[in-house]
């Protein structure tokens, strides 16, 4: 069985400061890991994904995440927050079975001017 | 990137009526589509996995007769909420898995907000 834990339900940063959204996973397999962003009343947009290639993954809009197997973590970072980054972020673990996919509870990012 | 379209994006209906939500993959074939339900300020809850040409696989606790899923073609899956009641009001999202890679990327629809009066 797989699971994913997003350690913070809400993160608030000031515009221009770094963003860190934390995600820990549990998987019996070598998982694929994804970060998605959801703006209000919208579907999910893929930010980046890890699929057993490079452990440091760069995504869209300046986001990146590092897969750390020893820590079972896949934290999402961005050097400088922008107002448009305010949204809900979901970490997703997807294993060997197409049906075995787990979403984190989500982290709401607020960006203050 | 690939596009998944959901229709309608908003629907209001009376209690007791049935509502159909469509999920289409516009520029790729999706043998597998997923249906989720999202409550306000909560994560997505997987309802069922829809496989083209076969019966959907429902998650525990999801009523098969209440939420009818049909995946008639490689580009279309439908979710029908039968005899809808106010407690069925929610945001429903579909996703489709692209084929051709070991871990297909999920592409999400924009979601459909259902309000049952």
Image (cartoon, grey):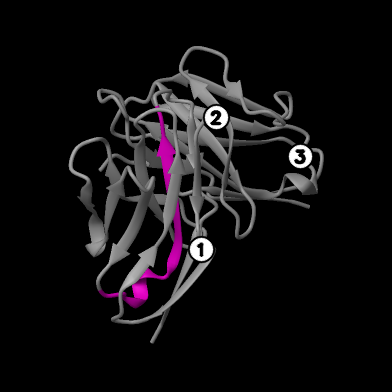
- Same subunit, tags 2 and 3: yes
Q: Position of residue B100 (x, y in %)?
A: 25, 23
Disc 2, SS: strand
- Check residue A8 in the rendering and tell me which mark sits there, or answer none: 1
User: Of marks 2 and 3, which one's residue comes earlier in the chain?
Assistant: 2
- Check residue A29 in the rendering and tell me which mark sits there, or answer none: none
Tell me the quarter of the picture where residue B19 sits.
top right
**Depth order, front residue of A99/B19:** A99
Q: Where are the magenta residues, as a range?
A: A80-95
Q: Position of residue B117 (x, y in %)?
A: 78, 52
**Depth order, front residue of B84/A71:** A71
Q: Which residue is mark 3?
A: B84
Q: Which residue is mark 2?
A: B78
On screen, residue B27 above or below B12: above
Q: Is residue A85 left or right of residue A99?
A: left
Question: Of the residues tagged 1 and 2, which is closer to the observer?
Answer: 1
Mark 1 falls within which chain? A
Report if residue A90 lies within the magenta region: yes
Q: Residue sitting at 56 percent across and 40 percent down?
A: B36
Instruction: Work out which residue is located at the far left of the displayed protein and give it.
Output: A54
Q: Residue sitting at 22 percent across and 50 percent down?
A: A57
On screen, residue B59 above or below A23: above
Q: Quadrant of the N terminus of chain B?
A: top left
């Amino acid at each position: 069985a797989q699971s994913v834990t997003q350690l913070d339900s809400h993160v608030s940063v000031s515009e221009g400061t770094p963003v860190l959204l934390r995600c820990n996973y549990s998987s019996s397999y070598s998982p694929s890991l994804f970060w998605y962003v959801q703006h209000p009343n919208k579907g999910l947009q893929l930010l980046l994904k890890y699929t057993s290639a490079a452990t440091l993954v760069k995504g869209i809009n300046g986001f990146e995440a590092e897969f750390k197997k020893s820590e079972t973590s896949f934290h999402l970072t961005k050097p400088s927050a922008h107002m448009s980054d305010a949204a809900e972020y979901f970490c997703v673990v997807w294993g060997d079975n197409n049906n075995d996919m787990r979403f984190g509870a989500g982290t709401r990012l607020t960006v203050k001017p | 990137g690939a596009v998944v379209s959901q229709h309608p994006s908003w629907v209001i209906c009376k209690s007791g009526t049935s509502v159909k939500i469509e999920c289409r993959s516009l520029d790729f074939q999706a043998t597998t589509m997923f249906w989720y339900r999202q409550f306000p300020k909560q994560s997505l809850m997987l309802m069922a996995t829809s496989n083209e040409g076969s019966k959907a696989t429902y998650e525990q606790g999801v009523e098969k007769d209440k939420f009818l899923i049909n995946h008639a073609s490689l580009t279309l899956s439908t979710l029908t909420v039968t005899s809808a009641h106010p407690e069925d009001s929610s945001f429903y999202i579909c996703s489709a898995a692209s084929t051709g890679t070991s871990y297909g990327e999920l592409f999400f629809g924009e979601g459909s907000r259902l309000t049952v009066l």
